[in-house]
């Protein structure tokens, strides 16, 4: 078996330029072999050794490509991932996995039948703030957790021109985009909820897609609140956790996306440090002692996603982001849409698999 995975990138838009190409280039386990660019936007200049193709069939027919990254518009994920799997390629799909749950079920079945690795780029599992929150919960620093609130807000009060993300396609809008991350994180921490209640809106003038949501997950004696808006000019906390013994509040966004946007490769010490100003505040009581202190943020590293995919392809490690987990995110999004449409909470009556 080859010791390097030769990868093809289905698009070199923002996702390819910022979130995929840098990791495939910097990771010694991969060779970024081919990029699909119908209109050249600079991948050849950035990566001189890369092969440029103008259509997806060229990616599929290249027998030297082992892995295809499907990072195209959301509504195309199912069709392009299916073609790649049927061509015998391992596949990484940009989130959201698919738009329809039945499409995701079919992709999982094909991957299983062909013994291929299929994963979804839920990179925010390796955000520094989420890793820190995860540890605070695991260490029981707040006692019994009673409320978890997570925000993924932005400020964009205009409608961006010439982008599919602002068009009324299936899978567009903040719910599928940023919501995929918040929902995935909550499911990683707490599993499937008993009930989903959602309020989904379009607040921007002239907007065609949803740009706000407030989703509540109900668990026994515990609640999750997930919120996102494009009209938050003054950022509040990213995470607010309340327990029987105390609280943890975390401001500030993980710096990895900012570094990637500046062209900083994901290697070296600069990659992992967050300024102490943004460390989360813990106010709690442990063994009868009151504690109020900053908690140093754990280092985030999106590299770990591709490290894991490599090891999964080489059969040395279980997938970190299983397609069944990514499909559960889509199922929850469907419940949220139904809840918003019907103005009521939607109960989870079927225990879906999370292991596929």
Image (tube, rainbow, N blue to C red):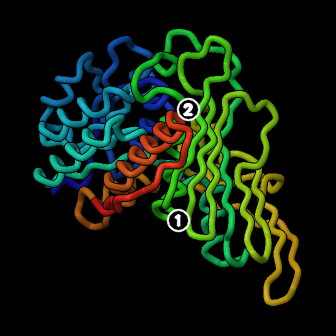
Residue at x 31% of width, y 27% of height = 76
The image shows residue 356 at horizontal and vertical percentages of: 27, 59
**Vertical relation: 298 (above or below) 158:** below
Q: Can you tell which mark lies on residue 121?
A: none
**Residue 45 appearing in the image:** yes
The x, y position of residue 320, in whole percent, is 39, 60
Q: Which of marks 1 and 2 is nearer the N terminus?
A: 2
Residue in the foreground of this view, choosing between 143 and 261:
143
Say few, some or many: other residues with alpha carbon within 10 Å of mark 1 (under 14 / 14 to 19 / 20 or more). few
Residue topped by disc 2: 174
Q: Give the residue drawn at x 36%, y 41%.
A: 97
> Is 303 on the left-hand or right-hand side of 234?
left
Q: What element does badge 2 sit on? A: helix
Name the residue nearer the viewer: 306 or 198: 198
Residue at image location 41% in from the left, 20% down from the top: 169
Q: Is mark 1 on a helix, strand or loop?
A: helix
Quarter-of-image position of residue 171 = top left
The image's mark for residue 190 is 1
């Amino acid at each position: 078996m080859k010791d390097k995975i030769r990868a093809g990138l289905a698009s070199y838009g923002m996702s390819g330029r910022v979130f995929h190409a840098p990791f495939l280039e910097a990771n010694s386990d991969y060779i970024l072999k081919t990029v699909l660019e119908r209109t050249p936007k600079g991948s050849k200049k950035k990566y001189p050794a890369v092969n440029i193709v103008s259509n997806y069939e060229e990616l599929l027919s290249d027998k030297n490509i082992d892995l295809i990254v499907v990072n195209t518009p959301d509504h195309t994920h199912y069709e392009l991932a299916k073609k790649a799997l049927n061509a015998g390629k391992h596949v990484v799909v940009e989130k959201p996995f698919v738009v329809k749950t039945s499409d995701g079920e079919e992709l999982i079945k094909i991957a299983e039948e062909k013994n291929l690795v299929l994963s979804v780029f839920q990179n925010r599992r390796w955000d520094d703030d989420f890793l820190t929150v995860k540890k605070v919960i695991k260490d029981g620093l707040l006692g019994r957790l009673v409320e978890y609130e997570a925000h993924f807000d932005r400020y964009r009060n205009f409608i961006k021109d010439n982008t599919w993300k602002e068009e009324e396609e299936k899978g567009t809008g903040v719910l599928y985009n940023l919501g995929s991350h918040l929902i995935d994180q909550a499911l990683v921490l707490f599993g499937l909820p008993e009930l989903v209640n959602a309020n989904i809106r379009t607040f921007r003038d002239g907007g065609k897609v949803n740009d706000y949501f407030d989703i509540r997950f109900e668990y026994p004696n515990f609640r999750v609140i997930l919120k996102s808006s494009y009209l938050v000019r003054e950022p509040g906390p990213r995470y607010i956790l309340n327990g029987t013994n105390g609280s943890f509040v975390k401001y500030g966004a993980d710096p990895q996306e900012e570094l990637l946007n500046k062209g900083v490769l994901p290697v070296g010490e600069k990659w992992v440090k967050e300024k102490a100003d943004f460390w989360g505040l813990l106010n709690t009581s442990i063994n009868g002692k009151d504690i109020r202190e900053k908690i140093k943020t754990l280092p985030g590293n999106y590299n770990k996603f591709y490290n894991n995919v490599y090891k999964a392809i080489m059969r040395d490690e279980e997938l970190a982001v299983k397609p069944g987990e990514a499909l559960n995110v889509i199922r929850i999004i469907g419940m949220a849409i139904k809840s918003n449409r019907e103005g009521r909470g939607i109960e989870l009556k079927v225990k879906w698999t999370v292991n596929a």
